[in-house]
Amino acid sequence: MRILPSGSRGLLLELDSLEEVLARYAALQEADLPILDLVPAGRTILVVADRGTELAPLAARLRQVEPAEHAGVGGEPVEIPVRYDGEDLSDAAHLLGCTPEELVRRHAEEEWTVAFCGFAPGFGYLTGSRFDWDVPRRSSPRTKVPARSLGLAGEFTGVYPRESPGGWQLVGHAEVDVFDPDRDPPALLVPGSPVRFVEAR
């Protein structure tokens, strides 16, 4: 693990894998440290220190925290109703070596967890625990992906919170907003949240 300064109150932890990020993130959430915020990403965790905290001693304490088994935030899964009608469903199934029906079954049966958030407010990068997902991105990204689109890319699945460019394989769309600034809290998904996709009828 490398620890680099990030601004006047931040430390950036560079790690070797997403699995290590999740294990470190779980441990740091439980550690008694002068930390204001933790922001996980694919291979990093940004640690934002409390005001007045010296970064060098904090870095030393961070190194002493042993990774934990990632268990998420607990509680009931967030259920997201979806329709599996995406225009890339057949292509994504072909890339996974299965039928579209099999992809839908696997996606709906998967035990998803929000690994981290980013790209846009409310966009969660979800990883699975039961199936080996590895879906290449589209060779030519779309300039406009509709809000609520459900996509696959690499080991992740996610729901676009708003219309934006994107290169993920679109396999469906959600029937709820994953980000609503008028809702409390605005983001439906936070790091560590368990998620279930429920096929809408």
Image (cartoon, rainbow, N blue to C red):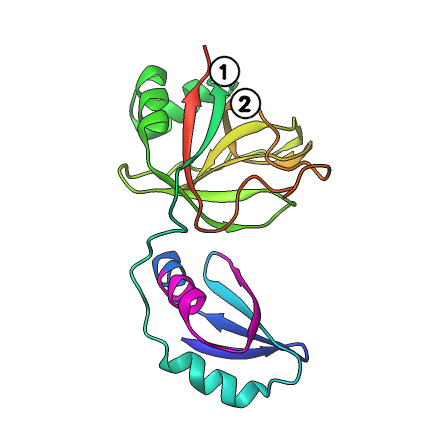
Callout 1 crowding tier (Cα within 10 Å): few <14, some 14–19, many ≥20: some
Q: Amino acid at mark 1?
A: Asp
Task: State which region is magenta.
Answer: 23-41
- Circle nearer the N terminus (2, 1): 1
Callout 2 crowding tier (Cα within 10 Å): few <14, some 14–19, many ≥20: many
Quadrant for residue 8, please give it. bottom right
Asked whether 33 falls inside the magenta stretch, the response is: yes
Q: Are marks 2 and 1 in contact (CB under 8 Å)?
A: yes
Asked whether 100 falls inside the magenta stretch, the response is: no
Residue under the point 65% across and 45% down: 121
What residue is shown with label 2? 173
Q: Is residue 140 left or right of residue 64?
A: right
What residue is shown with label 1? 85
Residue 34 or 87: which is nearer the viewer? 34
When the figure is inspected, residue 113 is found, relative to residue 86, above or below; the finding is below
Task: Give the Cα separation between the discs numbered 2 and 1.
Answer: 7 Å
Quadrant for residue 77, please give it. top left
Q: Position of residue 92 (x, y in %)?
A: 41, 26
Q: Is residue 133 left or right of residue 150?
A: left
